[in-house]
Image: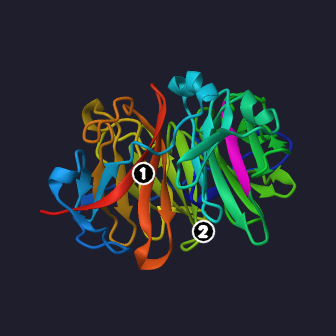
Amino acid sequence: MKTPLSLAVACTALASAPFLLAHDSGSTPHDHGPSPVPVIFQVEKKGPVKAPAAQDKSHVSHVSGQGFWKFAPVTTAMPVPAEAQPFVKGAHGTLIVDSERDVVYWGLEKVGWIGFSDRLKNSWIVKGDPAIASGNLHGADILPRKGQLPLVIAADNVEGEILLSDTTFRTVEKLKIPDGGPYADKKGWAPTDAAFAGDKTIWVTDGYGRHWFMDADAKPMKYRGNFYGGDSMSQTPHGITFDPKRNELYVSARPEAQVHEWSLKTRKSLAVHQLPKGSAACDTDLWGDYLLVPCLTGPNNTPGPLYIINLKTKAVVSTIKPKEDLGYGYAQHMHDACWYVVGKGRSAKVYILFTAWNPGGVGALELVNIKD
Protein backbone atom coordinates (compact mmCIF):
# COMPACT_ATOMS: atom_id res chain seq x y z
CA MET A 1 0.00 0.00 0.00
CA LYS A 2 2.57 1.83 -0.92
CA THR A 3 4.76 4.43 -2.30
CA PRO A 4 6.88 1.47 -2.54
CA LEU A 5 7.11 -13.57 14.13
CA SER A 6 9.25 -15.66 15.08
CA LEU A 7 11.73 -18.36 14.15
CA ALA A 8 10.27 -20.55 11.44
CA VAL A 9 10.17 -24.16 12.59
CA ALA A 10 9.32 -27.32 10.74
CA CYS A 11 5.89 -28.63 11.67
CA THR A 12 4.02 -31.75 10.76
CA ALA A 13 2.31 -31.26 7.42
CA LEU A 14 -1.43 -30.80 7.39
CA ALA A 15 -1.52 -32.05 3.82
CA SER A 16 0.59 -34.37 1.69
CA ALA A 17 2.80 -31.54 0.43
CA PRO A 18 5.46 -30.23 2.85
CA PHE A 19 5.15 -26.69 4.14
CA LEU A 20 6.70 -24.45 6.75
CA LEU A 21 4.90 -22.88 9.69
CA ALA A 22 6.13 -20.26 12.10
CA HIS A 23 4.29 -19.38 15.31
CA ASP A 24 2.11 -22.44 14.92
CA SER A 25 -0.66 -22.61 17.49
CA GLY A 26 -0.19 -26.35 17.93
CA SER A 27 2.06 -28.23 20.32
CA THR A 28 5.29 -27.76 18.35
CA PRO A 29 7.70 -25.50 20.28
CA HIS A 30 8.32 -22.14 18.69
CA ASP A 31 10.07 -18.85 19.35
CA HIS A 32 7.64 -16.06 20.21
CA GLY A 33 10.23 -13.44 19.29
CA PRO A 34 10.97 -10.20 21.10
CA SER A 35 8.60 -8.67 23.60
CA PRO A 36 6.64 -5.60 22.50
CA VAL A 37 8.39 -2.32 23.30
CA PRO A 38 6.15 0.73 23.84
CA VAL A 39 6.99 3.48 21.39
CA ILE A 40 8.37 6.72 22.74
CA PHE A 41 7.16 10.11 21.56
CA GLN A 42 9.72 12.69 20.46
CA VAL A 43 9.30 16.03 18.71
CA GLU A 44 11.62 16.66 15.76
CA LYS A 45 12.54 20.23 14.86
CA LYS A 46 14.02 19.20 11.51
CA GLY A 47 13.08 16.65 8.87
CA PRO A 48 14.47 15.02 5.73
CA VAL A 49 13.42 17.98 3.53
CA LYS A 50 13.51 21.73 3.94
CA ALA A 51 10.65 23.09 5.98
CA PRO A 52 7.98 24.82 3.88
CA ALA A 53 7.74 28.60 4.00
CA ALA A 54 6.56 29.69 7.43
CA GLN A 55 2.92 30.74 7.72
CA ASP A 56 1.12 32.66 10.40
CA LYS A 57 -1.38 30.65 12.44
CA SER A 58 -4.15 32.97 11.33
CA HIS A 59 -3.66 31.90 7.69
CA VAL A 60 -4.14 28.18 8.36
CA SER A 61 -7.52 27.20 9.79
CA HIS A 62 -6.69 23.60 10.76
CA VAL A 63 -3.34 22.04 11.68
CA SER A 64 -2.45 18.68 13.22
CA GLY A 65 0.84 17.12 14.26
CA GLN A 66 3.91 18.12 16.25
CA GLY A 67 7.26 19.78 15.58
CA PHE A 68 8.46 19.58 11.98
CA TRP A 69 5.65 17.17 11.11
CA LYS A 70 2.59 19.40 11.08
CA PHE A 71 -0.05 18.96 8.38
CA ALA A 72 -3.00 20.95 7.04
CA PRO A 73 -5.90 19.76 4.86
CA VAL A 74 -5.88 20.19 1.09
CA THR A 75 -9.60 20.40 0.48
CA THR A 76 -9.35 20.90 -3.29
CA ALA A 77 -7.40 17.68 -3.87
CA MET A 78 -8.65 14.23 -4.91
CA PRO A 79 -12.13 14.98 -6.31
CA VAL A 80 -14.12 11.76 -6.66
CA PRO A 81 -15.71 11.21 -10.11
CA ALA A 82 -19.48 11.66 -10.08
CA GLU A 83 -20.21 8.08 -11.13
CA ALA A 84 -18.14 6.76 -8.20
CA GLN A 85 -19.63 8.98 -5.51
CA PRO A 86 -22.52 6.61 -4.61
CA PHE A 87 -19.88 4.04 -3.56
CA VAL A 88 -17.66 6.30 -1.44
CA LYS A 89 -19.48 5.65 1.84
CA GLY A 90 -18.66 1.95 1.51
CA ALA A 91 -14.95 2.52 0.85
CA HIS A 92 -12.76 -0.18 2.39
CA GLY A 93 -9.66 0.17 0.27
CA THR A 94 -6.12 1.30 -0.33
CA LEU A 95 -3.85 3.88 -1.97
CA ILE A 96 -0.77 3.51 -4.18
CA VAL A 97 1.43 6.14 -5.85
CA ASP A 98 3.09 5.99 -9.28
CA SER A 99 5.68 8.66 -8.49
CA GLU A 100 7.31 8.65 -11.92
CA ARG A 101 4.04 9.56 -13.65
CA ASP A 102 2.56 11.57 -10.77
CA VAL A 103 -0.54 9.38 -10.62
CA VAL A 104 -2.25 8.14 -7.47
CA TYR A 105 -4.65 5.18 -7.47
CA TRP A 106 -7.40 4.65 -4.91
CA GLY A 107 -9.08 1.25 -4.60
CA LEU A 108 -12.84 1.60 -4.13
CA GLU A 109 -15.12 -1.39 -3.53
CA LYS A 110 -17.46 -2.18 -6.47
CA VAL A 111 -15.67 0.45 -8.58
CA GLY A 112 -12.03 -0.65 -8.85
CA TRP A 113 -9.20 1.84 -9.25
CA ILE A 114 -9.80 5.58 -9.34
CA GLY A 115 -6.87 7.57 -10.73
CA PHE A 116 -5.79 11.06 -9.65
CA SER A 117 -3.34 13.13 -11.68
CA ASP A 118 -2.10 16.70 -12.21
CA ARG A 119 -1.12 17.09 -8.55
CA LEU A 120 -4.33 15.36 -7.44
CA LYS A 121 -6.61 17.80 -9.30
CA ASN A 122 -8.05 15.47 -11.97
CA SER A 123 -9.68 12.08 -11.50
CA TRP A 124 -11.16 9.20 -13.46
CA ILE A 125 -12.37 5.64 -13.04
CA VAL A 126 -9.92 3.17 -14.54
CA LYS A 127 -11.59 0.94 -17.13
CA GLY A 128 -9.75 -2.36 -17.05
CA ASP A 129 -10.16 -6.07 -16.45
CA PRO A 130 -13.57 -6.74 -14.80
CA ALA A 131 -11.78 -8.60 -11.99
CA ILE A 132 -10.54 -5.27 -10.64
CA ALA A 133 -14.05 -4.00 -9.94
CA SER A 134 -15.78 -7.26 -9.00
CA GLY A 135 -14.61 -7.37 -5.38
CA ASN A 136 -12.63 -5.02 -3.16
CA LEU A 137 -9.06 -3.76 -3.60
CA HIS A 138 -8.32 -3.89 0.11
CA GLY A 139 -4.53 -3.54 0.14
CA ALA A 140 -1.94 -3.10 -2.61
CA ASP A 141 1.61 -2.24 -3.62
CA ILE A 142 3.28 -0.81 -6.73
CA LEU A 143 6.64 -1.78 -8.26
CA PRO A 144 8.42 0.71 -10.56
CA ARG A 145 10.15 -0.82 -13.60
CA LYS A 146 12.76 0.90 -15.76
CA GLY A 147 11.42 1.46 -19.26
CA GLN A 148 8.11 -0.25 -18.48
CA LEU A 149 4.87 0.53 -16.72
CA PRO A 150 4.86 -0.31 -13.01
CA LEU A 151 3.40 -3.55 -11.71
CA VAL A 152 0.58 -3.51 -9.16
CA ILE A 153 -0.22 -6.30 -6.73
CA ALA A 154 -3.54 -6.11 -4.87
CA ALA A 155 -5.33 -8.22 -2.26
CA ASP A 156 -9.08 -8.65 -2.83
CA ASN A 157 -10.59 -9.75 0.48
CA VAL A 158 -14.08 -10.19 -1.02
CA GLU A 159 -13.17 -12.50 -3.89
CA GLY A 160 -10.26 -14.08 -2.01
CA GLU A 161 -7.74 -13.31 -4.75
CA ILE A 162 -4.36 -11.69 -5.28
CA LEU A 163 -4.38 -9.64 -8.49
CA LEU A 164 -1.27 -8.77 -10.52
CA SER A 165 -1.27 -6.30 -13.41
CA ASP A 166 0.54 -3.31 -14.83
CA THR A 167 -1.00 0.15 -14.64
CA THR A 168 -3.06 -0.31 -17.78
CA PHE A 169 -5.03 -2.79 -15.61
CA ARG A 170 -6.25 -4.46 -18.81
CA THR A 171 -4.84 -7.90 -18.07
CA VAL A 172 -4.90 -9.41 -14.59
CA GLU A 173 -3.21 -12.55 -13.27
CA LYS A 174 -4.83 -14.17 -10.24
CA LEU A 175 -3.58 -16.14 -7.27
CA LYS A 176 -6.21 -17.77 -5.07
CA ILE A 177 -6.13 -19.65 -1.76
CA PRO A 178 -2.89 -21.57 -1.07
CA ASP A 179 -2.80 -25.34 -1.40
CA GLY A 180 -2.04 -27.34 1.72
CA GLY A 181 -0.69 -26.09 5.01
CA PRO A 182 -3.25 -24.30 7.19
CA TYR A 183 -5.46 -23.97 4.10
CA ALA A 184 -5.62 -27.66 3.21
CA ASP A 185 -9.39 -27.62 3.73
CA LYS A 186 -9.72 -24.68 1.29
CA LYS A 187 -11.38 -22.53 3.96
CA GLY A 188 -10.58 -19.45 6.02
CA TRP A 189 -8.99 -17.26 3.34
CA ALA A 190 -9.54 -13.49 3.05
CA PRO A 191 -6.28 -11.70 2.12
CA THR A 192 -5.99 -8.07 3.18
CA ASP A 193 -2.67 -6.86 1.75
CA ALA A 194 0.17 -7.74 -0.60
CA ALA A 195 3.65 -6.32 -1.16
CA PHE A 196 6.51 -6.69 -3.61
CA ALA A 197 9.94 -7.66 -2.27
CA GLY A 198 11.84 -6.98 -5.47
CA ASP A 199 10.62 -8.22 -8.85
CA LYS A 200 10.67 -11.94 -8.04
CA THR A 201 8.82 -12.16 -4.72
CA ILE A 202 5.47 -11.05 -3.36
CA TRP A 203 4.25 -11.25 0.22
CA VAL A 204 0.61 -11.74 1.14
CA THR A 205 -1.10 -11.38 4.51
CA ASP A 206 -4.37 -13.14 5.28
CA GLY A 207 -5.67 -10.63 7.79
CA TYR A 208 -9.35 -11.59 7.68
CA GLY A 209 -8.87 -15.34 7.31
CA ARG A 210 -6.53 -17.57 9.31
CA HIS A 211 -4.02 -14.82 9.99
CA TRP A 212 -0.89 -16.17 8.30
CA PHE A 213 1.41 -14.26 6.00
CA MET A 214 3.35 -15.96 3.22
CA ASP A 215 5.70 -15.49 0.28
CA ALA A 216 5.10 -16.36 -3.36
CA ASP A 217 6.85 -16.23 -6.70
CA ALA A 218 5.87 -13.17 -8.73
CA LYS A 219 6.31 -14.68 -12.20
CA PRO A 220 4.46 -16.92 -12.54
CA MET A 221 2.55 -16.36 -9.32
CA LYS A 222 2.89 -19.40 -7.08
CA TYR A 223 3.03 -19.84 -3.32
CA ARG A 224 6.27 -21.22 -1.91
CA GLY A 225 4.64 -23.26 0.85
CA ASN A 226 5.84 -21.13 3.78
CA PHE A 227 3.44 -19.74 6.38
CA TYR A 228 4.38 -17.29 9.12
CA GLY A 229 2.62 -15.58 12.00
CA GLY A 230 -0.76 -17.06 12.80
CA ASP A 231 -2.97 -16.20 15.76
CA SER A 232 -0.10 -16.21 18.24
CA MET A 233 1.37 -13.22 16.41
CA SER A 234 -1.82 -11.34 15.57
CA GLN A 235 -5.55 -11.92 15.42
CA THR A 236 -5.60 -9.60 12.38
CA PRO A 237 -2.28 -9.09 10.54
CA HIS A 238 -3.95 -6.42 8.43
CA GLY A 239 -1.10 -4.88 6.41
CA ILE A 240 2.33 -5.83 5.07
CA THR A 241 5.11 -3.57 3.71
CA PHE A 242 8.60 -4.32 2.38
CA ASP A 243 11.62 -2.20 3.32
CA PRO A 244 14.35 -2.73 0.67
CA LYS A 245 16.96 -0.75 2.60
CA ARG A 246 16.73 -2.99 5.65
CA ASN A 247 15.47 -6.13 3.88
CA GLU A 248 12.58 -6.31 6.32
CA LEU A 249 8.82 -6.53 6.41
CA TYR A 250 6.52 -4.42 8.54
CA VAL A 251 3.42 -6.36 9.55
CA SER A 252 0.53 -4.38 11.03
CA ALA A 253 -1.05 -6.27 13.92
CA ARG A 254 -4.33 -4.40 14.16
CA PRO A 255 -6.10 -5.47 17.40
CA GLU A 256 -2.78 -5.68 19.24
CA ALA A 257 -1.85 -2.08 18.25
CA GLN A 258 1.55 -3.26 17.05
CA VAL A 259 3.91 -3.06 14.11
CA HIS A 260 6.16 -6.11 13.75
CA GLU A 261 9.58 -5.58 12.18
CA TRP A 262 10.44 -8.91 10.54
CA SER A 263 13.72 -10.00 8.90
CA LEU A 264 13.62 -11.69 5.50
CA LYS A 265 17.12 -13.05 6.09
CA THR A 266 16.53 -14.81 9.40
CA ARG A 267 12.73 -15.18 9.11
CA LYS A 268 12.51 -13.80 12.63
CA SER A 269 10.81 -10.87 14.25
CA LEU A 270 13.44 -8.26 15.07
CA ALA A 271 11.25 -5.86 17.02
CA VAL A 272 7.64 -5.29 17.99
CA HIS A 273 6.66 -1.63 18.17
CA GLN A 274 3.83 -1.26 20.66
CA LEU A 275 1.58 1.68 19.88
CA PRO A 276 -0.70 3.17 22.55
CA LYS A 277 -3.42 0.69 23.52
CA GLY A 278 -6.38 0.92 21.17
CA SER A 279 -4.34 2.24 18.23
CA ALA A 280 -5.55 -0.33 15.71
CA ALA A 281 -2.74 -0.27 13.13
CA CYS A 282 -4.10 -1.04 9.66
CA ASP A 283 -1.03 -0.67 7.46
CA THR A 284 2.30 1.10 7.02
CA ASP A 285 3.92 3.12 4.26
CA LEU A 286 7.62 3.86 4.06
CA TRP A 287 9.43 7.01 2.93
CA GLY A 288 13.13 6.92 3.72
CA ASP A 289 13.43 6.35 7.45
CA TYR A 290 9.86 7.39 8.21
CA LEU A 291 7.05 4.89 8.64
CA LEU A 292 3.48 6.13 8.32
CA VAL A 293 0.95 4.12 10.36
CA PRO A 294 -2.80 4.70 9.79
CA CYS A 295 -5.00 3.39 12.59
CA LEU A 296 -8.62 2.31 12.51
CA THR A 297 -9.10 3.69 16.00
CA GLY A 298 -7.05 5.56 18.57
CA PRO A 299 -6.72 5.13 22.34
CA ASN A 300 -10.05 4.82 24.18
CA ASN A 301 -11.86 4.31 20.87
CA THR A 302 -11.09 7.84 19.68
CA PRO A 303 -11.07 8.57 15.92
CA GLY A 304 -8.22 6.87 14.10
CA PRO A 305 -4.92 8.79 14.04
CA LEU A 306 -1.96 8.71 11.68
CA TYR A 307 1.38 8.06 13.42
CA ILE A 308 4.79 8.86 11.92
CA ILE A 309 7.61 6.68 13.28
CA ASN A 310 11.29 7.54 12.80
CA LEU A 311 12.85 4.12 12.23
CA LYS A 312 16.29 5.32 13.32
CA THR A 313 15.16 6.54 16.72
CA LYS A 314 12.17 4.16 17.00
CA ALA A 315 10.11 7.15 18.13
CA VAL A 316 6.71 8.47 17.12
CA VAL A 317 7.54 11.96 15.90
CA SER A 318 4.02 13.07 15.05
CA THR A 319 0.41 12.13 15.72
CA ILE A 320 -1.99 13.51 13.12
CA LYS A 321 -5.75 13.51 13.72
CA PRO A 322 -7.72 14.05 10.49
CA LYS A 323 -11.14 14.03 12.15
CA GLU A 324 -10.48 15.73 15.46
CA ASP A 325 -8.05 18.42 14.27
CA LEU A 326 -8.47 18.83 10.52
CA GLY A 327 -12.21 18.87 9.99
CA TYR A 328 -12.63 15.63 8.03
CA GLY A 329 -15.95 14.58 9.53
CA TYR A 330 -15.97 11.19 7.82
CA ALA A 331 -12.47 10.27 9.02
CA GLN A 332 -13.56 8.21 12.03
CA HIS A 333 -11.49 5.19 10.97
CA MET A 334 -8.21 5.43 9.05
CA HIS A 335 -7.94 2.39 6.79
CA ASP A 336 -4.87 3.22 4.72
CA ALA A 337 -2.49 6.12 4.13
CA CYS A 338 0.56 6.81 2.00
CA TRP A 339 3.28 9.35 1.44
CA TYR A 340 2.93 11.54 -1.65
CA VAL A 341 6.17 13.43 -2.30
CA VAL A 342 6.45 15.96 -5.12
CA GLY A 343 9.95 16.81 -6.31
CA LYS A 344 13.29 15.45 -5.18
CA GLY A 345 15.91 16.19 -2.58
CA ARG A 346 15.64 18.75 0.16
CA SER A 347 13.20 20.88 -1.85
CA ALA A 348 10.53 18.19 -2.16
CA LYS A 349 6.99 18.93 -1.03
CA VAL A 350 5.47 16.36 1.30
CA TYR A 351 1.87 15.22 1.50
CA ILE A 352 -0.01 12.42 3.24
CA LEU A 353 -2.97 10.83 1.47
CA PHE A 354 -5.49 8.77 3.43
CA THR A 355 -8.60 6.70 2.91
CA ALA A 356 -11.20 6.14 5.61
CA TRP A 357 -13.65 3.33 6.34
CA ASN A 358 -17.15 3.34 7.85
CA PRO A 359 -17.89 5.87 6.54
CA GLY A 360 -15.57 5.84 3.58
CA GLY A 361 -13.70 8.74 2.11
CA VAL A 362 -10.38 9.97 0.77
CA GLY A 363 -8.30 13.04 1.57
CA ALA A 364 -4.97 14.83 1.27
CA LEU A 365 -2.81 16.62 3.86
CA GLU A 366 0.11 18.97 3.20
CA LEU A 367 3.22 19.47 5.34
CA VAL A 368 3.15 23.03 6.68
CA ASN A 369 5.39 25.28 8.75
CA ILE A 370 3.47 27.33 11.29
CA LYS A 371 5.12 30.21 13.10
CA ASP A 372 5.16 29.76 16.86
Residue 17 is tagged as none
Pinpoint residue 49: horizontal percent, then vertical percent. Answer: 38, 74
Tell me the CA gap for discs 2 and 1. Answer: 25 Å
Residue farthest to the bottom, as pictured: 345
Nearer to us in this view, 359 or 21: 359
Pinpoint residue 339: horizontal percent, then vertical percent. Answer: 48, 57
Q: From the viewer's perspective, is 366 left or right of 230?
A: left
Pinpoint residue 204: horizontal percent, then vertical percent. Answer: 67, 48
What's the magenta region? Answer: 151-157
Report the amino acid beneath label 1. Val
Pinpoint residue 359: horizontal percent, then vertical percent. Answer: 45, 25
Q: From the viewer's perspective, is 104 left or right of 10?
A: left
Q: From the viewer's perspective, is 83 left or right of 70?
A: right
Residue 257 in which image quadrant: top left
Q: From the viewer's perspective, is 181 left or right of 172?
A: left
Q: Residues within 10 Å of mark 1 (few under 14, many from 20)?
A: many
Dots 2 and 1: beta carbons under 8 Å?
no
Q: Which residue is mark 1?
A: 293
Q: Is residue 131 above or below residue 24?
A: above
Q: Residues within 10 Å of mark 2 (few under 14, many from 20)?
A: few
Of labels 2 and 1, the one closer to you: 1
Report the amino acid beneath label 2. Thr
Residue 184 in which image quadrant: top right
Residue 266 is tagged as 2
Residue 194 is at least partly visible in this image: no
The chosen color scheme is rainbow
The question of residue 242 being in magenta is answered with no
Residue farthest to the top, as pictured: 86
Nearer to us in this view, 221 or 66: 66
Viewport quadrant of the C terminus: bottom left
Q: Identify the residue at horizontal 76%, vertical 43% (top origin).
A: 163
